[in-house]
Image (tube, rainbow, N blue to C red):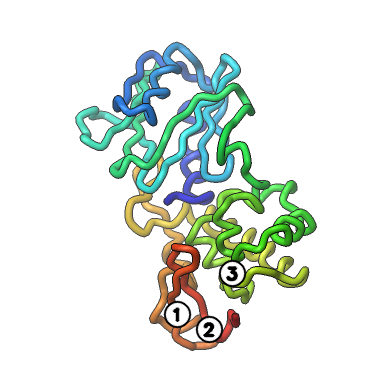
Amino acid sequence: MPELPEVESIRRQLEPLLAGRYVIEANSHPSGKFTPAREIVGLGFEAVLRRGKYLLFQLDNGTEMAVHLGMTGQLLPLHDLSDPHLRAWWKLDNNLILGYRDVRRFGRIRIYLSGQYEGTLKDLGPEPLSDDFSIDQFYASLKRSNRKIKTQLLSQRPVAGVGNIYADEACFKAGIYPGVRKLTKAQTVDLYKSIRQVLTLAVENGGTTLRDYVNAEGKQGTNQFYLVCYGRHGEPCVNCGEVLRRTVIDGRGTTFCGSCQRR
């Protein structure tokens, strides 16, 4: 699933293409998950924002179109509408066609009054690369729950945008076993710093491509070449040389070092 760095990479590429442009035609797959795409015909794009793993397209009538890419969603300029995995498309006043492609159909499109969100989008924690994300807030949020640390991160409530890849990377960098339930203040500081560091690197590298992710130019990210933990079970730890292990934490495959991340 595209996480913060992948979605941010797409946002940065889409905004200069869309800002100031108007939708003159649109269509979608008949599923209710995608039909809201049709509602923005005649409207103009003012900005393309991101909140966690969501893209937010600000429109000139005070609404926002929120797009979640699910597991395999892609947003790309198109020349051909015959792709069987195309779930929605928008034609702009300069004849550019933006398509939403989603093989597994786990993504979704919604229209909201600006800022009046529902569900997960409404309950997201602070943006990890913003000033709103503070150590004290992060510590207080983690302390309120008895769930495992990785599960808390994936819930999006203590901090937005962190998924399986970057949770493993951040916990490894901080020396924290992802299955622990409580952290000391010092451990929280280490995890806070690690989250910001691994996300910053991934954004600089254009995201991580393991299978389906491509950016709005159809290109893969390069951060997969910089991963030091996620998906590397059976390989030596870059810090101590011990073989990295794999476990399952609340249904999510997790890689860790038994020496550097003691339980």
Task: Classify residue 85 by image quadrant.
Answer: top left
Residue at 51%, 56% (x, y): give it: 163
Counting from the top left corner in percent of width and height, residue 148 is at 59, 65
Callout 2: few (<14), some (14-19), or many (20+) C-alpha neighbours within 10 Å? some
Q: Amino acid at mark 1?
A: Arg
Q: Earlier in the sequence, mark 1 or mark 2?
A: 1
Q: Nearer the viewer, residue 95 or 186?
A: 186
Q: Secondary structure at mark 1?
A: strand
Residue at 49%, 44% (x, y): give it: 7
In the displayed structure, does residue 40 sit left or right of residue 77?
right
The answer to whether the residue labelled 1 contacts the one labelled 2, judged by CB atoms less than 8 Å apart, is yes
In the image, residue 178 above or below residue 1: below
- The residues tagged by marks 1 and 2 sit, at their Cα atoms, a distance apart of 7 Å
In the image, residue 244 above or below residue 145: below
Q: Earlier in the sequence, mark 3 or mark 1?
A: 3
The residue where tag 3 is placed is 171
Q: Amino acid at mark 2?
A: Gly
Residue 204: tell me if it is visible: no
The residue where tag 1 is placed is 245
Q: Nearer the viewer, residue 57 or 109?
A: 109
Task: Classify residue 153 by image quadrant.
Answer: bottom right
The answer to whether the residue labelled 3 contacts the one labelled 1, judged by CB atoms less than 8 Å apart, is no
Counting from the top left corner in percent of width and height, residue 27 is at 32, 21
